[in-house]
Image (spheres, helix red, strand yellow):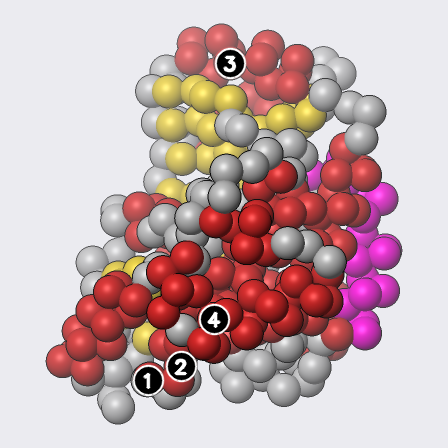
Amino acid sequence: MSIKCAFLFPGQGSQAVGMGQDFFNNSDVAKQMVADAAERTGIDFEGLLFTENDDLEKTEFTQPAILLVSAIAHKLFEDEMPIKPVYALGHSLGEFSALVSVGAINAIDAVELVNLRGKLMAEACAGQDVGMMVSLGLEDEVVEEICNAQREAGMKVWPVNYNAVGQIVIAGIKPDLEKLEPVLKEAKARRVMLLNMSVASHCPLLESAVVPLAEKLTEVLKDEFTAPVVSNVTAQKYSTKEEALDLLPKQLVSPVLYKHSIANFDDEVDCYVEFGHGGVLKGLNRKATKKPHFVVSDMASLATAIEEITKLG
């Protein structure tokens, strides 16, 4: 096919009980991947994904659950439509799903890896009242200046997710974030809201997780990229194990340049295909691109995506 696609993968915050269940109920491949992930990690993924529970909101479980569902969605798509993307891009955790999609890491190895990543992040934040907060309606520079001024005053707050025009997420110590809220509103933020997050991602509070994650990455990454991945850290493409080993540990403590990544390479693709629950990235992309965006989250949307991409091709 001549169609040029970018493959997209969501991160933490896209989780919901029931995600992936339609795949599981209707695909032997999905059943096997869930069983393999459970055997490797000791996590009851059927219980975690398909029944009401509190663990799905804990980062050590959230991350492997999201990655597993994204990997299943991609695998089922690939089995029906074996096209190579122009590039793969994930938001935060989703960068690891993107690596799976281009063959740089085995799916079950990746589930185990991000289970560890979640544990390391939780340990780094243990004993601290941490959180994350979204600001809507302000320019990046305004949020950056406010956060810089607050840090100079002794507060621990950092802009960490550059999601879309006028949407930026801030991480740090929760009481400091709460003090930041009226400052952002005074600067004319349209909305400021604390997020349901158990860690403070992509900021210096996670420094202790960098080295142990890098050690595990050395074990599981392969130098077999079938397409480049766009780095959250640089908003540029990479396609070797050496580059991945440099960038992925840095990703823990560096901002996610998601909107920059879309802007940098939008002109190279005809459409976007998002693998996983929720269509979160479709929402972020709404103002950033006019290209078609397909979400593969269950068997029906899988069939629709294949049909529509075939028409485009």
Q: Residue furthest left?
A: 311
Quarter of the image containing the C terminus? bottom left
Residue neighbourhood size for the residue with mark 1, other residues' Cα within 10 Å, grouped as few (<14), some (14–19), many (≥20) = some
Q: Give how far apart the Cα atoms at labels 1 and 2 are.
A: 5 Å
Earlier in the chain: of badge 3 and badge 1, it is 1
Amino acid type of the residue tagged 3 in the rendering: Glu
Which numbered mark, 4 or 2, is in the foreground of this view? 4
* Residue at 56% over, 66% down: 34
Magenta span contains residue 125: no
Q: Which residue is mark 3?
A: 181
Q: CA distance from mark 3 to mark 2?
A: 44 Å
Using the image, tell me which numbered label, if any, was put on residue 81: 1
Report the magenta residues as a range. Answer: 202-219
Image quarter for residue 241? bottom right
* Element type at mark 2: helix
Mark-to-mark CA distance, 4 and 2: 13 Å
Q: Give coordinates of residue 26: x percent, y percent.
A: 36, 69
Q: Which mark is residue 30?
A: 4
The secondary element bearing badge 1 is classed as loop
Q: In this orientation, which residue lies closer to the viewer: 250 or 112?
A: 112
Q: Are marks 3 and 4 in contact (CB under 8 Å)?
A: no
In front here: 43 or 178? 43
Q: Which mark is residue 78?
A: 2
- Look at the numbered discs 4 and 1 and tell me whether their residues touch, using CB distance below 8 Å: no
Using the numbered discs, state the Cα–Cα distance from disc 3 to disc 1 in whole angstroms: 46 Å
Q: Residues within 10 Å of mark 4 (few under 14, many from 20)?
A: many
Query: Which residue is rendered at x = 79% and y = 58% of the image?
Result: 213
Mark 3 or mark 4, earlier in chain:
4
